[in-house]
Amino acid sequence: MKSFYEFGLSKSVGESLKIMGFEEATPIQEKSIPVALQGKDLIGQAHTGTGKTAAFGIPMVERTAQHSEKIQGIVITPTRELAVQVAEELNRIGQVKGVRTLPIYGGQDINRQIRALKKKPHIIVGTPGRLMDHLNRKTIRLQEIQIVVLDEADEMLNMGFIEDIEEILRHIPEERQSLLFSATISKPIQNLAQRFLKNPEFITVKAKEVTVPSIDQSYLEVQERQKFEVLCTLLDVQSPELAIVFGRTKRRVDELYEALNKRGYAAEGIHGDLTQSKRESVLRQFKDGVIDILVATDVAARGLDISGVTHVYNFDLPQDPESYVHRIGRTGRAGKKGEAISFVTPREINLLRLIENITKHKISRRPIPSIKQAIEGQKRVAVEKLLQIVDEGGVESYRILAEDLLTDQDSVTLVAAALKMITKEPDRTPVELTEERPLRTKKVQPFKPRMKNFPKDNWVKTDTRKKWDNKGNRRSKKRATV
């Protein structure tokens, strides 16, 4: 991997990266930064967790004139959480140079945003809906934009933002640099790029580079009605420090986190229907360790950057197999080990195989843990708690009490009693969840760049194969091969 010093960055940006602890570039950064620094348009195919924010953020800050009072760059993102996260990273990259970035998103007081805009930020990061509000109010002017980034373009199109994106891009000068980043490159993404990007260079990160080797991936084959009991048993066996449990629907998330609370787990849920203040409160509690289990939908969790997540549980497999990589990317960060466990019903095995094909990674099957293992797991946690208290000290005031107890009881019996008292016994409070129907296997199309304005090196070769149609006539069909 390349060092950031090999990109010829300015001293101020280099100092910011040093403060941030950046040393070696990730694959997507190594490929994207030199192209973006030259002012070329590009399409980057990369998932969350690959370092794509810095891949476009470093060139963006580098090419921004800090002495200008005009908005020179704009990043469009699908969710509020991602907008905040991207803005935070851009502000860190621009801290020494003095380049200021402002997040603009729905759910926040628009008048507060208008006041912030009067402080002349150099870059804005916003969600499509709120950006449209400001354009209609004429509180944001994009006539001086030199670089535009579409982040997680596939997710924005899935959420129905295509018309807003097109309208925003029409307000930006044609003489600009455009960078598009997406986990998947579907036909709508190609069409968008064809209309708004000029001779873009295509950059991709191979699947083996996307699926982080520090994540241990496995699955359990369970019936839908068994899922919750198995999840509770797993939580008791593994006792994760911070865990995210993914549910497919908002209803599932609500029922699941409430059920976990009934069983004595510190859990909260997050999905698109929550108010912005509630979402921020839940995330703050999770980051601070007040709750150790976050139950979330895909959309709500997209773009979250929370360090220290040790386990990801796919309670439901994702609707789109591509989302699997986004989910597991919540753990195993900064070189730390992480674990991702998926719950798969018998009818969803084909979907699991499809995920394996996409990620180029074999997901191992694990046995369903037993109640006995859960109890042993909790005993282990109790021992660790006891030893932690010993290490931390502060037990002097209890010594006299302990010595008095030892006159009547032996030490082993007393320690055993203390462990029994602090061991969490498996809770079997009755819980009822609404069943979710198993997903049908969705055919995932590989990337097929057919745009006329793509560089010739990226054009698709075709071969012709003959097949019989339904009437018995021979027909010829061209198939794309990358």
Image (cartoon, grey):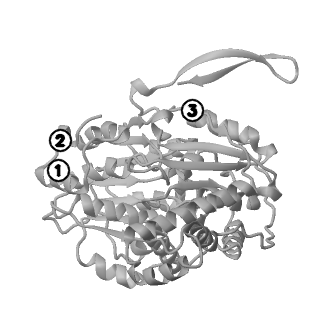
Q: For the point 24% across and 43% down, which residue is it?
A: 37
Q: What residue is disc 2 on?
A: 5
Does 111 sit left or right of 229 as displayed?
Answer: left
For the residues bearing labels 1 and 2, Cβ distance under 8 angstroms: yes
| Residue 187 drawn above or below residue 89 | above
Could you tell whether 199 is left or right of 365 in the image? left
Q: Position of residue 370 (x, y in %)?
A: 74, 53
Residue toward you, 99 or 473 = 99
Distance of mark 3 from mark 2, alpha carbons?
32 Å
Mark 1 or mark 3, which has the lower sequence index?
1
Q: Quadrant of residue 374?
A: bottom right
Q: Residue at x 64, y 21 (%)?
A: 478
N-terminal-most mark, 3 or 2: 2
What label sits on residue 14 in the rendered view?
A: 1
Circle 3: residue type: Lys
Q: SS of the residue at dot 2?
A: helix
Q: Are marks 1 and 3 in contact (CB under 8 Å)?
A: no
Q: Residues within 10 Å of mark 3 (few under 14, many from 20)?
A: some
Query: Total marks drawn?
Result: 3
Q: Amino acid at mark 1?
A: Gly
Label 1 sits on a secondary structure element that is helix
Residue 126 x/y as whole percent:
41, 66
Question: How far apart are the two marked residues, 1 and 3, measured between alpha carbons?
Answer: 35 Å
Q: Position of residue 4 (x, y in %)?
A: 22, 42
Measured Cα–Cα span from mark 1 to mark 2: 7 Å
Whether residue 374 sits left or right of residue 63 in the image: it is right
Residue 360 disc label? 3
Residue 91 is marked as: none
Q: Is residue 266 above or below residue 165?
A: below
| Residue ID at (51%, 31%) | 450
Report the amino acid beneath label 2: Tyr
Residue 59, position as x, y percentages in the image: 25, 49
